Amino acid sequence: MVKALKHSPVKLAIVGGGAAGMFAAAVATERKIPCVVIERKARLGSKVLMTANGRCNFTKDVSPERFLSDLGPAAEFAAAAIRECPPRKIVAGFKSLGVPLKRMPDGRMFPADGKAATIVHAFGDLLRDGGVPVISNCPVAGIQPQKTGFIVATANFTLWAENVLLATGGVSYPKLGSVGDGQRFAAALGHRIVPYRPGLIGMETRDPQVLRLAGRRFEDGCARVVSPEGARVFEYRGEIDCEPFGLSGAAVYNCQRFIEHSLRGNPRLRHADFTLEADFGGRHFAFKGLKPRPVKEAIVTIGGVALEDVDPSTMESRKTPGLYFAGEVLDIDGPTGGYNLTLAFATARRAVCSIAGSPA
């Protein structure tokens, strides 16, 4: 005979099974918080599987102070989360799960086998062993606050949760599940959404010198941003790739991100006002008026839920108590090289520890 069960809400519903959602569920397991993960795609970690060309550069082994210095505009908001969950804590966490790791000379960290699936499988094993329910192939249709908790609605069922963590990502690579639904839920609940811009994306040029080199990668490249006044205001050394559309690679990506944040800070500026200098293949180039590829192709989305609407000490909404945010759904982004996954992990940990009422 089955004893009748009392109907009660789950402590935490995690909407999104990417980097932030998986890490949040792992922390919830550690803190013994009953939770459920709801993922719109068929499996967890779809976007994680393609990071760093499928190798998964999951963090950069630098001090919290160096990390925050490199971060730029979001550093103040992310400071508490990063100091409580710095890169070395993330590295130690994966080591504790038995994942062999590889450290590059510049501090970038990868699974030793160079396979992003190793990281995703480690999360999957942890959630399985912790008994965490994962509902996949299940887009969330809406989130409705109640007197106690929230109703999380899908096409086939509704779920009652005390707390909801939105970990749905940005709007880059929509085929992998990042379609902006978390931002839409937040907007419906009164949060401001900062307009989207592409972050860490290639730049288009029709320069024949570049197009003739399409398919070539230059590992020792250097790219610089020259301001409208003619000053060199940003520089990054790293690979530069020549593409059929123009330029990509880490050096170009980080310069493009710098330009996008400069445009946000001064709406009167345009892409055409900046010059991109690039040194590769033994030659110096100067490109004027480069434009970025579309946001759907970007490694990261600039924009999202406005940070003013979120308490950085808890990742809880200032407008809707019990609603939390982690990762790229927020208006936070970092340079290439493991920074964005670290942000996802650290903000997720901060949110779940806040729900647990315990320090990170």
Image (tube, grey):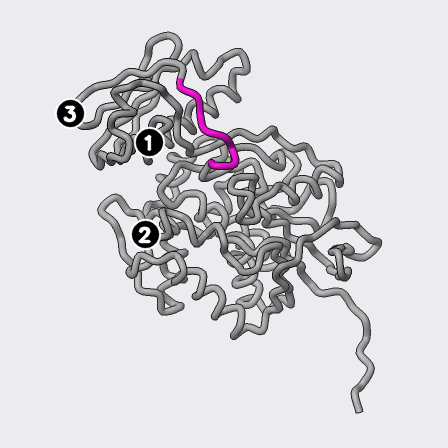
Verify CB contact (< 8 Å) between mark 1 and mark 3: no
Q: Quickly name the residue at label 1.
A: 243
Magenta-drawn stretch contains 277: no
- Amino acid tagged 2: Met
Label 3: state its secondary structure: loop
Residue 272, relative to residue 152: is it above or below? above
Magenta-drawn stretch contains 296: yes
**Along the line of sight, the residue nearer the viewer: 194 or 38:** 38
Give how far apart the Cα atoms at labels 1 and 3 are: 18 Å
Instruction: Name the spot of residue 284 as percent of width and height, x first.
Output: 21, 19
Q: Quickly name the residue at label 3.
A: 282
- Amino acid tagged 1: Glu
User: Which quadrant, please, contains the N terminus?
Assistant: bottom right
Which range of residues does the magenta coloring cover? 290-297
Q: 40 left or right of 47?
A: right
Q: Earlier in the sequence, mark 2 or mark 1?
A: 2
Residue 339, relative to residue 113: is it above or below? above
Residue at 24% of width from left, 28% of height from top?
213
Location of residue 11 (image quadrant)? bottom right
Instruction: Name the spot of residue 262 as percent of width and height, x first.
Output: 46, 21
Residue at 27% of width from left, 56% of height from top?
102
Location of residue 206 (image quadrant)? top left
Location of residue 271 (image quadrant)? top left
- Amino acid tagged 3: Gly
Give how far apart the Cα atoms at labels 2 and 1 are: 26 Å
Label 1: few (<14), some or many (≥20) within 10 Å?
A: many
Q: 98 left or right of 282?
A: right
Q: Earlier in the sequence, mark 2 or mark 3?
A: 2
Label 1: state its secondary structure: loop
Q: 36 left or right of 152?
A: left
Mark 2 vs mark 1: give the one in front. Answer: 1
Q: Quickly name the residue at label 2.
A: 109
